[in-house]
Structure formats: C-alpha cells, structure tokens
C-alpha cells in the first residue's frame, strides 16, 4: 500500500531569483488606453515574433494547423496570436521532430507570427470526462462529458491502475495516449522542456483541471497542488528562459476564497502574464459573475518578493472561451486576449458569422441569394469572391472547399470584431 502524500505549501516568492522579477527586454505589455467606464483597456503585447493588439482573439491550431486554412490565410485575416496544443504535439509529431525543424515557427513556416502553447494539462484532464475508448475513437478531439456526475473522474495516487486513464500524484500526471494507449507521464518540468523545444513566444505551466462538480476539499487540494506545479514549472523555465514569456494560470473554480488565494499567490511570483483557467462556470452568467468579482483585483497591487507587484501592468488571458457574448463581457472586465476554436468549429458545421447574426448556410433560403456575400461589410477573400448561394451549394455537396472558405471568413470576422471592440474602448463607449 502506498504511503499517503504529505502536501507541502508552495514555495515563497523570495525563493525565486531577484533578476526574475525584472522586466523582460524581449516581452513587453504596453497599455495604450484605459476605459473610464469599465475595466476595459487597449494595449499591445510585444513578442520576439510580432505584436499582439489587445483586446484580441487567439485562434486555436490544435495540431499546429488551423482546421481548413493555411496560416497565410489567417495572417491575411489579421490573425496575430495563435494557440498550439502541447498534448497533441507531444504525441504527434513529438518534441524531437519540432525541435529538429528549429521550433514551431520554422516547422509551420510562420516566422513573423506570435505563438502560444499550453502545458497539455487541459487535454490530459479532459480525458477524465470519458473512457479510453471515447478518446481513442475521437482521435484526440476531446469532448467534455455531462456535468451531472459529482464523482471525481480521475484517479489519485492511492487509486488502482484499473481506474480512469488519468492518474495524479504530487510528481505530475500519467495519462494514456489516444494514439496507441501507452502510458505517458507529464510533470511540471517535462511540459516546460517540451515547450522549450517548441519555442513559442508564450508558454503555460502545468495545472490540474478539476471538474465543475467537485467536493470543496478536493478542489482546495487541487488548487494547492496546482500552485506547487506552477511554481515548479516556473523554476524550470527560469533555468533557460530562451526569450519566452510564461503565464500563470489562476484557479479556484467558482469558490471565491480559493480564487482570491490563487490570484494573490500566483501574481506574487515572477510570471510574465496572467491566465484565467480552471472551471469558469456552467454558463455565461456564472462566467461573468466570476469575472466581475475577480478582475478588479487585477488592478490592485499585490505582494512580491521585494515589495508590491503591479498586476495592472501584465497581460491577462482567458483560457478556452471566445464566443461573442463572452468576449463582450470579458473585454469589459479587462481581459486582454482569449482563445477558442469557436469560429473554426462553427465553420465546419455550416455556421457563418456576420454583423447581422449567424448565417446557417444549410438553409434552403440561401440557395438563390445570388450576389449576396456572407457579410456586406466584410473584406475577407470569401466575401469578396463568393456569394451565399454558392456557399450553400458547397456545403450541401459536402465539398472540402466550403470549410476553407467558411473558416477564412469566420477568422476574419473575429478579428474585425476585436478591432471594433478596441475602437469602442478608445471612443469611450465600453
């Protein structure tokens, strides 16, 4: 029988080297304007591979590829920051291949576009919501299970090997590959080393993602473990910075005491930016309630190793949520960037975004809309060259070209939408 693990408190901010608290010459957040009506702000994140205008949308390229479009198309649609998933890249093609190519920027031939990679933790813990069979059969495209189960869906170190395909210990997490079922360990140190191989401009530490329904004590233990993991990730990063910025991930679910504790501890460490993660609620209302309560603390000074920490001066990222209603609320509450596969997923299912509302192109009413673009105000190549009738035909005929044209438009629309939000802030309307 295993001995029970003895939880230690996370390291004090003073244990990190003093130089790590100094500003980075390769990564800088510039605040251009702050709203007088809300927490919204307009800024620029300067990275080694380009500038990111904020607030900004971050497209998701799960396997270092956007679904249906080339990176040149995305760049033409003013897509700046792109998110790649460490979990998938670890399994295919592997760190040795990407590192051999000279890093992700060279591997995907996007030398002048900033990239962000995650730790792989989200995908690993998403395995806990379904069986190994479900993960294998979906080829790694993970789906959240129903939030009705209150039983913890993943195993801890004292559980048997016959349990769920995710095992958590203080050292890290062990999961099963969706490609061949083999067990793969992921630790705070190993995920940072993987992200060093990838060479993204912004990297994320390993964190634990508990489900929405969870016992309060289990959630508290999870947050404490995440703090220790993120501190270890940061220590590993600081051994070889390589002109990469690292964001912490603030946790705590909907428990306000844990959220406050997580925010205060992680912002006291020398992270370069702050990500909001963990369970963010079961709907948009709970998300907004959380942000409205939490984000004002991001403008307050915190305590660091040698005095106060100005949280306001660092960028804030909302993980995994970027649909239009959520963006409106997030921008108002001071979020700078947000990632989601929302527009590319919609395009695959025949939904096109427009200023007049969503266009569900499968409807027969579009079959004779000759000369009518998806959005009359959109300047993307799809809207300049094709009408709704032709797109209806492509979708009904299941032509692969549809996904390309639809995705080009939806990504362009999202970046136009974010540009509009920036202007509204500057005009004093948000």
Image (cartoon, helix red, strand yellow):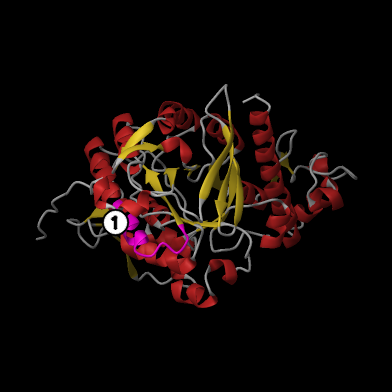
The image quadrant where one finds the N terminus is: bottom left
355 falls in the magenta region: no
Number of labels in the image equals 1
Looking at the rendering, which quadrant does residue 400 occupy?
A: bottom right
Few, some or many C-alpha atoms within 10 Å of disc 1 (few <14, some 14-19, many ≥20)? many
Residue visible at 34% across and 55% down in the picture = 234
Q: Nearer the viewer, residue 427 or 160?
A: 427
Give how far across and how far down residue 165 sits, in percent: 32, 60
Q: Which of 313 and 414 is in front in this view?
A: 313
Residue 187 visible, this orientation: no
- Residue 73 vs residue 175: left or right? right
Considering only vertical position in the picture, is 289 above or below 253?
A: above
Residue interval drawn in magenta: 231-244
Looking at the rendering, which quadrant does residue 186 occupy?
A: bottom left
Considering only vertical position in the picture, is 144 above or below 377?
A: below
- Residue 65 vs residue 196: left or right? right
Looking at the rendering, which quadrant does residue 161 occupy?
A: bottom left
Residue visible at 30% across and 52% down in the picture = 231
Considering only vertical position in the picture, is 34 above or below 88?
A: above
Residue visible at 71% across and 42% down in the picture = 416
Residue visible at 37% across and 69% down in the picture = 181
Q: Mark 1 points at which residue?
A: 232
Give how far across and how far down residue 117 sits, in percent: 48, 58
Provide the secondary structure element on which disc 1 rests: helix
The image quadrant where one finds the C terminus is: top right
Give how far across and how far down residue 27 sits, in percent: 51, 53
Considering only vertical position in the picture, is 275 above or below 423?
A: below
Residue 200 visible, this orientation: yes
Residue at the far top in the pictured view: 37
Residue at the far right in the pictured view: 371
Q: Nearer the viewer, residue 115 or 244?
A: 244
Give how far across and how far down residue 427 sits, in percent: 68, 27
């Amino acid at each position: 029988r295993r001995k029970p693990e003895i939880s230690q408190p996370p390291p004090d901010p003073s244990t990190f080297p003093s130089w790590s608290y100094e500003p980075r010459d390769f990564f800088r957040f510039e605040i251009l304007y702050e709203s007088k009506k809300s927490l919204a702000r307009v800024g620029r994140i300067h990275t080694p591979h380009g500038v990111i205008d904020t607030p900004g949308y971050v497209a998701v390229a799960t396997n270092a590829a956007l679904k249906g479009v080339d990176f040149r198309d995305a760049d033409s649609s003013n897509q700046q920051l792109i998110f790649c998933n460490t979990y998938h890249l670890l399994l295919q093609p592997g760190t040795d291949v990407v590192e051999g190519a000279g890093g992700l920027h060279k591997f995907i031939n996007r030398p002048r576009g900033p990239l962000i990679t995650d730790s792989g933790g989200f995908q690993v813990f998403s395995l806990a919501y379904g069986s190994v069979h479900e993960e294998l059969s979906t080829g790694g495209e993970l789906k959240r299970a129903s939030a009705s189960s209150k039983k913890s869906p993943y195993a801890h170190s004292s559980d048997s090997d016959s349990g769920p395909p995710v095992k958590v210990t203080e050292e890290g997490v062990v999961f099963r590959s969706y490609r061949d079922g083999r067990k793969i360990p992921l630790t705070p140190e190993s995920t940072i080393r993987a992200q060093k191989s990838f060479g993204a401009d912004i990297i994320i530490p390993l964190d634990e993602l508990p489900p929405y329904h969870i016992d309060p004590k289990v959630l508290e233990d999870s947050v404490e473990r995440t703090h220790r993991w993120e501190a270890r990730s940061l220590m590993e990063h600081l051994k070889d910075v390589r002109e990469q910025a690292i964001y912490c991930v603030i946790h705590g679910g909907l428990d306000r005491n844990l959220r406050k504790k997580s925010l205060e501890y992680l912002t006291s460490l020398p992270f370069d930016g702050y990500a909001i993660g963990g369970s963010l609620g079961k709907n948009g209302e709970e998300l907004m309630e959380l942000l409205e309560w939490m984000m004002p603390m991001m403008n307050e000074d915190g305590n660091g190793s040698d005095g106060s920490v100005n949280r306001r001066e660092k960028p804030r990222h909302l993980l995994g949520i970027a649909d239009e209603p959520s963006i409106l609320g997030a921008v108002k509450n001071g979020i700078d960037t947000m990632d989601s596969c929302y527009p590319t997923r919609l395009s695959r299912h025949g939904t096109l975004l427009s200023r007049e509302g969503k266009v569900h192109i499968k409807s027969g009413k579009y079959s004779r809309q000759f000369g009518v673009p998806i959005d009359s105000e959109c300047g993307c190549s799809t809207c300049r060259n094709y009408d709704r009738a032709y797109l209806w035909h492509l979708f009904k005929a299941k032509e692969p070209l549809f996904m390309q044209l639809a995705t080009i438009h939806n990504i362009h629309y999202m970046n136009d939408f974010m540009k509009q939000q920036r202007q509204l802030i500057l005009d004093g309307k948000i």
